[in-house]
Amino acid sequence: MLLISRLFKGLDKNWLDAIAVTAWGALLLNYWLNGSLSILIHPSYFWLAAFTGFALLIIGSIKAYLLFKYPQAKPSAAGHVSLLPGNWAIGLLLVTAIAGLLINPRVFTSSKAIQGGVTENSAITRSQPQSFRSQVKPEKRSLVDWVRTLSAYPEPDTYSGQQANVSGFVVNSTELGSNYLLLSRFVITCCAADVYPVSLTVKLPADQQYKADAWLAVTGQMITETIGGNRQLILVAKNIKPIETPRNPYEH
Amino acid sequence: MEQLNNAFTLFLSLLVEAIPFLLLGVLLSGLLLFFVDERKLVKLAPKNPILGAFVGSCIGFLLPVCECGNVPVARRLIVQGVPLPVAVGFLLAAPVINPIVIWSTWIAFRDQPEILWLRVIFSLLIATIIGWIFSRQGDVKSLLQPAVALSMAKPLSEEDPEKPTLLRSGNFMLGGGESLEAKMVASLERKPQFSLAERGNMLLDNTMQELRELGGILVLGSALAALIQTFTPRELILGLGQGSVSSVLAMMLLAGLISICSTVDAFFALSFGGAFTSGSLLAFLVFGPMFDLKGIGLLLSVFKPKAIFYLFALAAQLVFLLTLFVNFNIN
């Protein structure tokens, strides 16, 4: 903080304003164009971020143009009460925009899923049960469709023998044996701050193990098994294929 | 390192989701200064204390301000002769009863629409009750700072009718000098002092200033939310967040300490959505805009310290009771 304050001390506040606002415009447009928005917010709000990016770019550019053209003009903002001392506010905005431009946001890892309670009963991690599509054929269901269907009709025997074809990232749980993993996805409602994890337990073929965070497409058959005293639905993997991290890593 | 990456993603996601609403809020409040004539609102203010407090609570729709801008406007309203319940209602509810705040809350809590409705209802209810309680004080000057009370003594009609609304008594912020808002409203007067280009320039400066100040706080708030969500042990968060009373107290304390702007505070609350009770999220969303640590300095320019204490003590108790009711009966 002190460094930020010293760094910007003495620099023209108006120019810093223009640069910071332009930088935020550039950052939002950059995220929109390079696809990073899908890691940060729900697709419904991409347009809002892109629109704001354009608006901030225009506002910052106009301000910079006016400062360049009329360098002696005084700002019309006299008598303003600042909330943060000195140039801290603008420094924070500028440093954050630069950091965002230099460091691309990354998809959440399995540690976030564990922190979010993926290994526990997931009821507590969800604000409300979501709608589900029970009409979807079993092999067409996504991982989230499976979890939602299960939360509506929890009897595992209902699904025994059904085919499944799902994808997600690996969470290794110490509570399960080494031949099991949790295939997981995050569900997003608004932005990455509200994501919650959902998962299916996958039983691996005898000689296979996968590292946490690896993305897999798994096909197999559902069975009922008792693990740790709980009867639960297990996907017995027949075919496991490593896949790239999807462009949009969240389910909705 | 992994956790740092997670925290950084979380931090950016809060900012990317919130900044559009911050910009919209700043632009809308700046633009409306050109179109809404406060003097007409003053004349229309009801004299009945309860009705007045309720109408004052709803004025935020016409003068959309967050908790950073409501104190100077409330001060202006008082000095212009608005009954105290109207001004108190406005002071407490305006940061929530605002189209941008309502929209951002709806987007953040699409899956729990009751959070939005209850946020609006509780804010209106609490602001109206406190406005009514303040109306019971016969001598309002015992609640107000002497300078404000003196300004009130001067009837509006004695002031120069040619003088722009915001250049009249009580229209200056604590730092002294002419505020940008005052200049903006002055530009609307019959004898135009400012050209269209100058008005545009003022709007631009106002936008930059607000983005800077509120954006800086937003960055700090988002960083705090990301750090808490990433590094606080899950057991601790759940232990605190799932208790009906402890969760409400914790979120009220957080609301008091963090001065995040009401246009974007819904996203901050959302980051606690999985672990904290609905009542506690509501407590944050209702109490936060009413009690603002940084705004106490501004409030002292209007009210005496004991009045500010009553204002916040009443607000805190009502928020606590109402949100506790939610936790016990609606959750």
Image: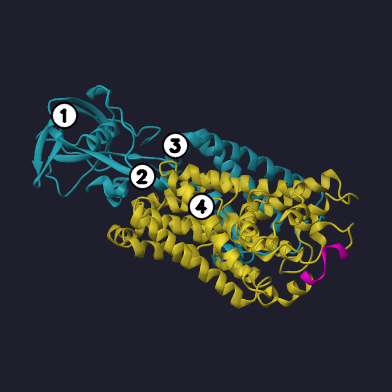
In front of the other: A180 or B30: B30
Task: Give yes or no for contact between labels 2 and 3 (Cβ–Cβ under 8 Å).
Answer: no
Mark 4, residue position:
B121
Whether residue B45 sits left or right of residue B2 in the image: it is right
Residue neighbourhood size for the residue with mark 4, other residues' Cα within 10 Å, grouped as few (<14), some (14–19), many (≥20)? some
The residues tagged by marks 1 and 4 sit, at their Cα atoms, a distance apart of 45 Å
Secondary structure under tag 1 reads helix
Tell me, yes or no, whether the highlighted magenta stretch contains residue A28.
no
The residues tagged by marks 2 and 4 sit, at their Cα atoms, a distance apart of 36 Å
Mark 2, residue position:
A108
Q: Which chain carries label 4?
A: B
Q: Which chain carries label 1?
A: A
Q: Chain A is drawn in which colour?
A: cyan
Residue at the spot x=30%, y=60% of the render?
B233
Q: Quadrant of residue B174?
A: bottom right
Indicate which disc residue A38 carries.
Answer: 3
